[in-house]
Amino acid sequence: MTERQSAQDIIHRSSRSFSIASWFLPVATRSKVWALYAWCRSLDDAVDLATSPSQAKENLQRFENDLIGAHDREPTQQPASEWILPLVLDRQIHSRHALELIEGMRMDLDGYEVQTDADLEKYCYHAAGTVGLMMTSLMGVKEQAADRHAVALGVAMQMTNIARDVKEDAQMGRSYLPGITKPLEAKADDIAQAVRKILDHAETRYNLAIDGMDYLPWRSRTAIRVALEVYREIGRRIRRNGYRVMSGRTVLSKPRLIAVASRAVLFDMLCIVSLVVRRLLHPGLFSLKEPNMTNTSNPSDPHPISTANQAKQIALLGLSLTSIMATALFVMVYFNPKSQEYSYLPLIYAVGSLLASVLFHRLSVRYDKPNPQAT
């Protein structure tokens, strides 16, 4: 099994949401994101599967030593460090952010108490805001102004996780609800109020993350939008259930997951098609953000994108958009069948349409490259 296949298997087994979203990333970026996820998952396992807190701390120390000694080419103490070290050595992510993530895990082991909203914010930054910063680095984002939006998305997702996992965390002796140290002994109304407040904070940060989407390269934007909307839907499901988080863990069914992902892709495709059309009609006024590339709509560019390629790109994006609309239609038919004979057939068609959308989207990317033969 190759390294890439191993990382792919890890994200596929551990997170349906991130696994689905990752397929909308460019191939080169996708493999790096899989590697980063595999490393993060290994960190979790190093703590969760440890036989004692002291062993967990020793495991984290070895991960930290590998990061600190990376540039000196010292032998790794944790095999899983091989996922992230190439990214650090190539300066595609900052080791500082990875070290801050490890520090967040130590906060758990040291019994970090969340008493205030500021305590919650600090914990969520270390646990997930750092991952947001590493993700933007992998996607080639250079603008520092994008950092606050990346952190906001990571924090929002972590807050959603906290709201979803109140019971599970409480059974392990943990609580991230400000002011509530023992959820198993707290009143249901107090827990509901705390969860509602956390989800309100998360919603504010989801909106801030959306405001920063323009900083992302358009080839990666759809993937981030899908992940955002799927996690956001988990929070909305908790709200619709009356914040009854102690009754069980809130999860999205596969049909609902497909529907939310399809809606996110549809919205993002509309934005992309709009930008491409405007760029074609008004060259020089609009551009699609791509890192380390010149503005392809600049007339002085020695390798401009040909008009034919732009037309092909628009056509493929249109097919991708049509496939997404078909996905949404089949999902609606599945939930509201005219005949019981339909069974799972609409759902199968929905999955096929979604895969077709991804394929057309990936093909469209090929026509957004400079034409070296142009003069």
Image (cartoon, helix red, strand yellow):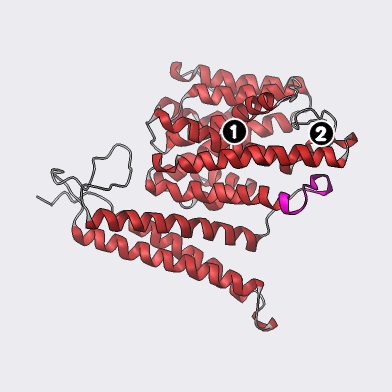
Mark 1 and mark 2 in contact (Cβ < 8 Å)? no
The answer, for residue 325, to whether it is visible in the render is yes
**SS class, disc 1:** helix
In the picture of the structure, the residue carrying the numbered disc 2 is 172
* Residue 65 in the image: above or below residue 211: above
The answer, for residue 83, to whether it is visible in the render is no
Asked whether 224 or 352 is in front, the reply is 224
Q: CA distance from mark 2 to mark 1?
A: 20 Å
Q: Is residue 353 left or right of residue 371?
A: right
In the picture of the structure, the residue carrying the numbered disc 1 is 128
Percent of width and height locating residue 293 = 27, 40
Q: Is residue 293 left or right of residue 346?
A: left
Q: Nearer the viewer, mark 2 or mark 1?
A: 1
Q: Is disc 1 surrounded by few (<14), some (14 to 19) or many (20+) residues within 10 Å?
A: many
Picture residue at 83% right of the left edge, 44% below the top: 246
Per the rendered image, the range of residues in magenta is: 239-248
Residue 243 among magenta residues: yes
* Residue 364 in the image: above or below residue 301: below
Percent of width and height locating residue 221 = 43, 47
Q: Is disc 2 surrounded by few (<14), some (14 to 19) or many (20+) residues within 10 Å?
A: few
Q: Amino acid at mark 1?
A: Ala
Picture residue at 61% right of the left edge, 42% below the top: 203
